[in-house]
Image (cartoon, helix red, strand yellow):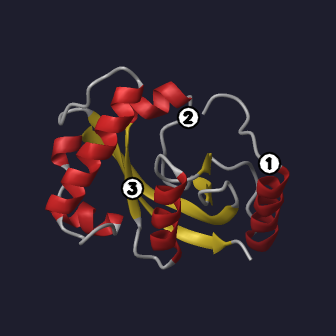
Amino acid sequence: MTGTISMTDEQAAAWTDFCRDTGHEGPPAFVGPFGDGPELANELLALILIDQKTATCSRAYWYQVEGHKLPEAGDKCLILDGTGRPRCVIETVSARIAPFSSGDADFARAEGEGDLSFDWWRAAHIDYFSREAERDGRTFDLDEDVVFEHFRRIWTAP
């Protein structure tokens, strides 16, 4: 992460509540929604809130472009819904950088999306990462490095 993370008053209040409730001190490692639009953000959030989604992957390039630090175990992130409202805090359990092509069925199940199959996961992520790369004027390559991150939900906004 470079610099201070910007939060709305509502987001900052939720982070303050999280810190008060858990005894955590310090800023979040990340504040934002999952996905690339409000509908996907809400869909993925719903899976997090029922603890079906306990993993995510992102292009390593995205962290560089967005100026975020790479995730590491112990990071706490404030996850927003599709309208930017704070909904929960997750804690990174583990993170590894590896080619997208190294993803497997166990990781696909942990992501908790679609029919939980590796084939669904692979196709959906190729589509998503291709859209994301295109916005950057790039092409997604199956051997591009991604961050495979496992997390757990540790707090839910009231």
User: Where on the picture, by quarter, is residue 15?
Assistant: bottom right
Q: CA distance from mark 2 to mark 1?
A: 18 Å
- The residue indicated by pointer 1 is 8
User: Where on the picture, by quarter, is residue 132?
Assistant: top left
Query: At numbered mark 1, what does the secondary structure look like: helix, strand or loop?
Result: loop
Drawn side of residue 105 relative to residue 15, left or right? left
CB atoms of marks 3 and 1 within 8 Å:
no
What amino acid does circle 1 point to? Answer: Thr
Q: Residue at x 75, y 66 (%)?
A: 18
Q: Position of residue 22 (x, y in %)?
A: 73, 71
Q: Residue at x 61, y 49 (%)?
A: 32
Q: Residue at x 80, y 48 (%)?
A: 8
Q: Considering only vertical position in the picture, is 120 above or below 5?
A: below
- The residue indicated by pointer 3 is 56
What amino acid does circle 3 point to? Answer: Thr
Q: Which mark is residue 68?
A: 2
What amino acid does circle 2 point to? Answer: His
User: Where on the picture, by quarter, is residue 62?
Assistant: top left
CB atoms of marks 3 and 2 within 8 Å:
no
> Residue reaching furthest front?
39
